[in-house]
Amino acid sequence: MVKCSIHLVFVSAVIMSNPRAEIFSQGEEVITGQVADTNAAWLSEQLVNMGFNIARHTAVGDKLPDLEELLKEISRRADICICTGGLGPTLDDLTAEAVANAFKRPLLLDSIALTQIESYFFNRQKKMADINRKQAFFPEGSVRINNAWGTAPGFAVLQNRCWFVFLPGVPTEMRNMFRQHISKQLQQRFVLQAEQLFVIKSIGMGESDLQQKINDFALPENVQLSFRATAEEVQTKLLFPANAENTACVSQLIDLIGDAVFTCDKPAKPAVSFIQLIDQLMTEKKFTLAVQETATQGLISAKCIGYDWLTHASYQPFEQAENTDYIKIAADIAHKLKHKNKTDLVLVQLYQGNKTQFLNKKQSIVIYNVLLTPEGIFQNSHILAGPVKRKQNQAALRALDLLRRFLQNKCH
Amino acid sequence: MVKCSIHLVFVSAVIMSNPRAEIFSQGEEVITGQVADTNAAWLSEQLVNMGFNIARHTAVGDKLPDLEELLKEISRRADICICTGGLGPTLDDLTAEAVANAFKRPLLLDSIALTQIESYFFNRQKKMADINRKQAFFPEGSVRINNAWGTAPGFAVLQNRCWFVFLPGVPTEMRNMFRQHISKQLQQRFVLQAEQLFVIKSIGMGESDLQQKINDFALPENVQLSFRATAEEVQTKLLFPANAENTACVSQLIDLIGDAVFTCDKPAKPAVSFIQLIDQLMTEKKFTLAVQETATQGLISAKCIGYDWLTHASYQPFEQAENTDYIKIAADIAHKLKHKNKTDLVLVQLYQGNKTQFLNKKQSIVIYNVLLTPEGIFQNSHILAGPVKRKQNQAALRALDLLRRFLQNKCH
């Protein structure tokens, strides 16, 4: 039976600096290209930000000999390896067995893990299937990593020079377990000098527009600049050396980019997402909101899940006529909704474009957003192109961005 | 100077069956997690569909010794390796140099490649920078792969048992070069027999429940069974050998799993998603739908984006009282909405649980779905746990699944 706690084992390990890290993903769906390996990307980003040197990502399928061979290889060349996948209850989940075979560590029952798995099912008023018992067996000498987000506990084991951490492949479980259990232990186990990363987050400007805008800005030589566009935002990333003291160019850049910036994540501060920021501002100002959607069909509302300040939302198809004054119509709807729902703010979205223009990725639509506030009406409009889901998502972000700009006093 | 054409060299190579393929990605942005390795996923999918056996994906950064070591390893264990990235003009583009060092093949100028690169700039009325000359040098014995979509030509080389194909990392260039130059050559070089994949897609049963249910089912020995849970569905996958003629066990398994199955994707047929299936059925039956949401807050509606049959959707927080008869209240709301909106179907969702239970990932809520149809009222209810976004997504799927079951005559 595995008894010692993860905390003790981690701390007792050898301390080293400049550690070599690898990421190892297990799963047929990665190796056969059914999903891109976003776990590897996410874990690498965390480790790089902590100061690790990432040497390799490797993905293999669910063939036991391939898994064993790879584990042996990595145990000889890496200081830390984070592995995801293969911890489920089914026959193709072979990680623990591969570790047992590769490192001659027989599988032993961890009774606490078994109780946790049983509770997981009990809390959902389900009976645990027999095959889930398998998830409570770990290779001898391993340390359990609790999983409060699913059925599969992880485990960690030191083999040769490498500390292996095994986490489930389900992204939410893996990320939560890494944040809650692993990152602190890594800080204790290794001497890490993290570079300082600032992430300026903006919405409403493309990567190349951003690059164009800051082209002539003279960055200090020791600062690395990069850009990254996600579905939600565009990030301008500035990486300073661990010992850099003068980071004044960050706020200069924020000023240069302008109102499109909604926040800047700083080293060792929790990151703030676009919707979290809106929630902070709405809560602070004690505003309530009603929304009427067209092109987004519920997505503006869905993005505000869990926040009380959204009190009404509705969707119905918008009948378009020629020569429509979209802003005027939207403003009229907003006034009616305010009268009916008594919210502080009303956000109304309309769009111009027929069904073909909406569905065809090569065609575009124009969206019009109107925000009715105690200070009057604010508005924006945007041309959106791409596949229908991209149009939907962008339309929702642009509508919420009007709200964000109002809340940050950036509506002109 | 490299002279022979890629066509000749490929065809003259040894023909073999059941080839072992690897994917190798080069680039700091992959290894540090700034981008997920979508090239590897795309290439794997192409190769699997052609009948290759993918053994590994590996990604490394731009350190020459790492690249050389990996190339040597792969040359000893794979029959074919597709490599992306590192063919650009800048200092951190080291692929050709790594191949030259690893395999002792000096870099030689390919004058045709140089002309192609010069023309690329000339056609865009730009002057070629000196650093771009580097892209016309290939390791001795390589074969050029033309790139009509960018500046970086690729190259291919046979080393030990492995045929290496080097392509640029820019996805559009890589994909076009693969489609136009590589896939046909692979068909000629290897004897390929694509396996037959059936994917039984279900909703409403976990992976372990599914496995339990089909535990005693005797699958033919040559069939590989696996499971995959996505945020939208659970897949039971059956992989038959290329020459298998009797696939009757697929429909037997579908019957065994029961009403949770919404579709089965078959080899060489386009895959159908959950929402696409609902759209097909709604369109076929010419039904219209109105939705009232609570826990999902717009997500049911948002998932139906682009489909005309959804004509109304609304969200408002649901005030819960003690001893509420949720099904009765939902049915009352449904009747009122039907009267107001005149749709054929009305879907109403309520839930039981306070705000803490909804937001806390360790607590659960109960959702109640009611579907009003011309044939009467149908209903289901489910306990949902996990983070709020998971509850929201599961609640939307369970509501739409009630609709799906009605449309497939599976409401009992």
Image (spheres, coloured by chain):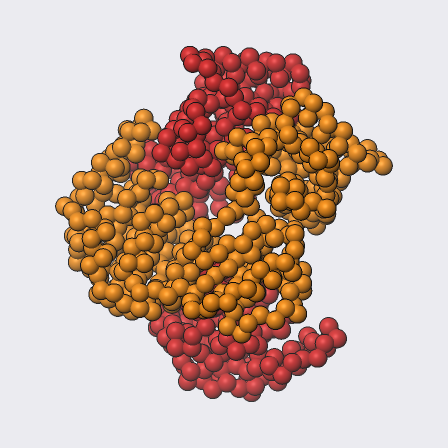
Chain colours: A orange, B red
The quadrant in which residue A99 appears is bottom left
Direction from residue B312 to residue B31 in the image, left or right: left
Percent x, y for residue B143? 53, 78
Q: In which quadrant will I find the N terminus of chain B?
A: bottom right
At a point 63% along the width and 83% down the height, the residue shown is B130
* Outermost residue to the left: A1
- All told, the count of numbered labels is 0
Direction from residue A201 to residue B128 in the image, left or right: right
At a point 55% along the width and 46% down the height, the residue shown is A274
In this picture, is B251 found above or below B156? above
Percent x, y for residue B400? 52, 29
At a point 60% along the width and 62% down the height, the residue shown is A252
Instruction: Tell me, yes or no, if residue B234 can be seen here.
Output: yes
Percent x, y for residue B166? 50, 71
Residue A399 or B399: which is nearer the viewer?
Answer: A399
* Outermost residue to the right: A323
Residue A367 or B79: which is nearer the viewer?
Answer: A367
Instruction: Tell me, yes or no, if residue A208 can be seen here.
Output: no
Percent x, y for residue A409? 65, 44
Residue A228 or B77: which is nearer the viewer?
Answer: A228
In this picture, is A241 found above or below A349? below
In this picture, is A373 found above or below B129? above
